[in-house]
Amino acid sequence: MITAMTMPIITGTEAIPMDKSLMSSGALYRLLAWLSPGYPVGAFAYSHGLEWAVETGTVADRAGLDRWLRDLLAHGGAWTDAVLFARAHDAAIAGDRTGLAEINDLAIALCPSSERRLETTAQGNAFLLATRASWPWDDDDGNAIPGDCAYPVAVAWAAAGHGLPLEPALHAYVHAAAANLISAGVRLIPLGQTDGQRVLAALEDAVAQTAAAAQAADLAALGGCAFLSDVAAMRHETQYTRLFRS
């Protein structure tokens, strides 16, 4: 005799109750939607300074792109965003709106150039606009962060509002950040699509390590030493020929 398994019923965009160690099919569906290249945040338009690095020959091939992204994940903007995501998720889960707003202010203040600020706030604002229209959550009245919202804070806020656990949400966010820059590298260097996937496959452990370390880190761990990435973002502001906005 086969007994039907009792599954939680998800209707509309209600929050998804779940064990912290498990993720329901509904939670997975939302993560895949929000962090896919097709979600309307304009991620394809930003290279995080990579365009300048390619222009100057600092990144010229698959190995160079791999090294560049490993540095970002361990010491640069990808690491900082991962920590901000984790702590914003904590604040949102706890209903600490003051803390969430303060983390957002910090995220914006840490941007080392005007283009980096544009990169995170344009995507964050676009993410909230699309998500509020398509995937609203009960405790969002738009007042917690009334102004510009940094991208990692926006995604973490929505994930917490929908009951998505931190671990898979953060891992998916870091993966998406790496994948987006690989896509930029494929177009800029240029690389073939297969080489792009080889870089993504090679970064599997690095992405997992960054997500795991950020999950355990507090805001005091923010900081980095990927200085060339920051310089690249600043130099990109005056680069003569550009395909990307950062």
Image (cartoon, rainbow, N blue to C red):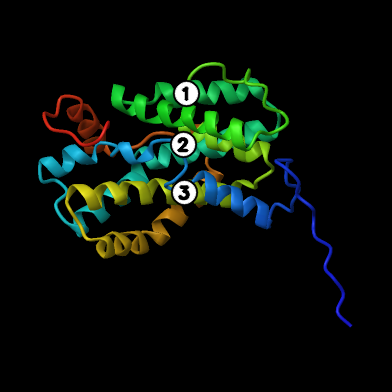
Vertical arrangement, residue 101 with respect to residue 30, above or below: above
Q: Position of residue 133 (x, y in %)?
A: 60, 31
Q: Nearer the viewer, residue 241 or 226?
A: 241
Secondary structure found at label 3: loop
Q: Earlier in the sequence, mark 3 or mark 1?
A: 3
Count of numbered labels shown in the rendering: 3
Mark 2 = which residue? 221
Amino acid type of the residue that numbered disc 2 sits on in the rendered structure: Ala
Question: Circle 3: is it few (<14), some (14-19), or many (20+) Cα within 10 Å?
Answer: some
Q: Earlier in the sequence, mark 1 or mark 2?
A: 1
Disc number lying in front (1 or 2): 1
Cα–Cα gap, marks 2 and 3:
28 Å
Secondary structure found at label 2: helix
In this picture, residue 27 sits left or right of residue 198: right
State which quarter of the image contains the N terminus. bottom right
State which quarter of the image contains the C terminus. top left
Mark 1 = which residue? 106
Q: Position of residue 103 (x, y in %)?
A: 53, 26
Q: Position of residue 97 (x, y in %)?
A: 65, 23
Question: Which residue does the image show at 39% across and 36% down from the upper left?
Answer: 42
Amino acid type of the residue that numbered disc 3 sits on in the rendered structure: Ser
In this picture, residue 79 sits left or right of residue 114: right
Q: Position of residue 222 (x, y in %)?
A: 44, 34
Which corner quadrant of the image does residue 236 belong to?
A: top left
Mark 3 = which residue? 36
In this picture, residue 60 sits left or right of residue 129: left
Question: Circle 1: is it few (<14), some (14-19), or many (20+) Cα within 10 Å?
Answer: some
Disc number lying in front (3 or 1): 3
Asked whether residue 218 is in view, the answer is no
Disc number lying in front (2 or 3): 3
Secondary structure found at label 1: helix
